Image (cartoon, rainbow, N blue to C red):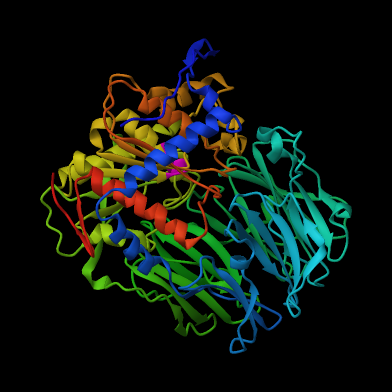
Amino acid sequence: MAYPATRAEQVVDTLHGVQVADPYRWLEDEKSPEVQAWMKAQDALTREHLGKVPGRDALVRRFTELFYVDSISPPARRGGRYFYIRTHKDKEKAVLYWRDGEKGQEKVLLDPNTWSKDGTVSMGTWAPSWDGKKVVFAQKPNAADEAVLHVMDVDTGEWSKVDVIEGAKYASPKWTPDNKGFYYEWLPTDPSIPVDARPGYTTVRYHVVGTDPKQDALVHPRTGDPTTFLQSDLSRDGKYLFIYIVRGWSENDVYWKRPGEKDFRLLVKGQGAKYSVNAWKDRFYVTTDEGAPRQRVFEVDPGKPERAAWKEIVPEDKVASLQAVNIVGGHLALEYLKDATTEVRVATLQGKPVRTVQLPGVGAASNLVGLEDLDEAYFVFTSFTVPRLVFKTSVASGKTEEWARVELPMDPDLYTTEQVFYTSKDGTRVPMFLVHRKDLKREGNAPTLLYGYGGFNVSMEPTFRGSILPWLDAGGVYAVANLRGGGEYGKDWHEAGRLGRKQNVFDDLHAAAEFLAREKYTQPKRLAIYGGSNGGLLVGAAMTQRPALYGAVVCAVPLLDMVRYHLFGSGRTWIPEYGTAEKAEDFKTLHAYSPYHHVRPDVRYPALLMMAADHDDRVDPMHARKFVAAVQNAPGNQAPVLLRIETNAGHGGADQVAKTIESSADLYSFLFQTLGVEMRQGGVAAQGR
């Protein structure tokens, strides 16, 4: 392909005695006119190429049917009012509604479809006051993480002109019971603060509605440590305010006080363990992996908060990993994963088991959502081939009824999901979900898309993804590997894939690919891998370590330069997960797998589609640019290397359905073309090369 010209420079750093070449460092400067022109040319080349793929129009039509849907979220009940999100078949963005009582008249509260002509302003977090009369919400330009908080009067629909709070990138507002104000995390927008140092400037503040935000009271000062997150929480009754100082995804400290008291007191110092607290009726319910890799729950008397006085009420389950705990209807709602599928259990506040919530099948369910003192609760169920179902349940009786469902033009009975287990390089047993049509014949030639993440204690659950349906109908297999680094099996599973053990994650993916070939599902030239963010690092490492094992790679909003990642975006907050090249031992690990630094001139790599976003303020798009430049300019590489840049979009992509359809059509057009799958008007059919 005739790629845009990309110059290489003789830039070499010496780090810990090792010379590290960085020929495309100039592509880090996104504001440079040369870089802007390069990006524009790369994106134009990609869109022109993919726009000509036969059958792309059919994909657009199918995704239009699948993505424009009517759906409703579980409601949040506040003061007798119900607040919930709806999507509509004829709208680009989800809309926030409210009504008086469960059966009251539905009214639009916030419609981000009306906020900008081009749809580039998005709605972020939202939180109604406890009396349901006000709502605080975030606006996010370009769907980025940066946000501005606003306050709205629910009855009049008026936005306050006073309550406008910038610096809400990490904000999660918590209303006080008197409905007069809320606590929130605030990040200064001062451009003189270095980007990589900015997370350490986060503070917790209290805002009184109707007053100048510049006068908001400082509740907790900044830590000054850019590798930490500062978070706050407030008990429902307003008696207890909690501060979390979070170091990565493996440990945190918890402080608390009663509002009005001067100083916070330490509840627990996390030393290789993490803690979360639910407070109700003068008791703290602490969920932790301290001494229990799959987590357990303690009851704590705030009058005797010392660690020795904690009482274990929910012991660690040896075969299921506790993911989340809520207090609903005077009970504990416990969400577990057992071999990466959900179980929701109900227990008394003393930890005595009451029941396991009956789910409509094997899949992924949310925990119960509701209020501590109300019996009604809601939960969501989904699976790879079952669109979202919302259920209403009684915590006391267990009586459950369907509350809402998503209707799609599809027949779930055509497909099947199987869970397999394979052995990784070091003998570890790893689970993987395989989704395909029931009439699939295992002849070693099915086009297969393997998805993975493997990091940050994030669990890959069997949730619905409508975009895979044309792939399945083409005779394809969709595989999701539950790699180490995730949270599927608790703390130990996460620890096995972070810092110096990161290579385990890549080995797990390679072993998944080998299993799929060995068991006659596919073969390397028909196997694609796909990952985003940390998953983008995963597939970048996979293609540079074992290029012959894969036929195509889709890499989205990735980290790929692991030597300099900590200097950009939110990079320093990830040091507890990856380490930093500033330390000799960490550098040795990072440099050993950093995909950008392992692009070799004499290797033929699998075809690559790189998907970036121009307003990604979490993972800097410089990773995508530098890696694409390196692979395009590797003399031995002959497969296509394409860079697609979503405009007016952040790390999570654009939140407009039309843009999601276009990006999905490009992604699958790339896969169908690369893996030799024939697409036909009105449908697609598998065809070997």
Residue 27 horizontal/vertical position (percent): 52, 27
Q: Give the quadrant of residue 126.
A: bottom right
Quarter of the image that includes the N terminus: top left
Residue 496 appears in view: no
Task: Tell which of 242 and 217 is nearer to you.
Answer: 217
Question: Which residue is located at x 56 percent, y 63 percent?
Answer: 325
Q: Is residue 583 magenta?
A: no
Question: Which residue is located at x 83 percent, y 69 percent?
Answer: 180
Query: In this rendering, is residue 360 above or below 290?
Result: below
Quarter of the image that includes the C terminus: top left
Task: Tell which of 182 and 112 is nearer to you.
Answer: 112
Residue 344 appears in view: yes
Magenta span: 532-537
Residue 255 horizontal/vertical position (percent): 74, 50
Outermost residue to the top? 17
State left or right for residue 584 relative to residue 600.
right
Q: Give the quadrant of residue 284.
A: bottom right
Task: Tell which of 681 and 360 is nearer to you.
Answer: 681
Main secondary-structure element of the magenta-colored stretch: helix
State left or right for residue 497 relative to residue 32.
left
Query: In this rendering, is residue 624 above or below 681?
Result: above
How many numbered marks are there? 0
Question: Which residue is located at x 32 percent, y 66 percent?
Answer: 385
Task: Tell which of 69 and 678 is nearer to you.
Answer: 678
Residue 24 horizontal/vertical position (percent): 48, 22
Q: Give the quadrant of residue 333.
A: bottom right
Question: Which residue is located at x 54 percent, y 83 percent?
Answer: 396
Query: In this rendering, is residue 682 above or below 371?
Result: above
State left or right for residue 415 relative to residue 154.
left
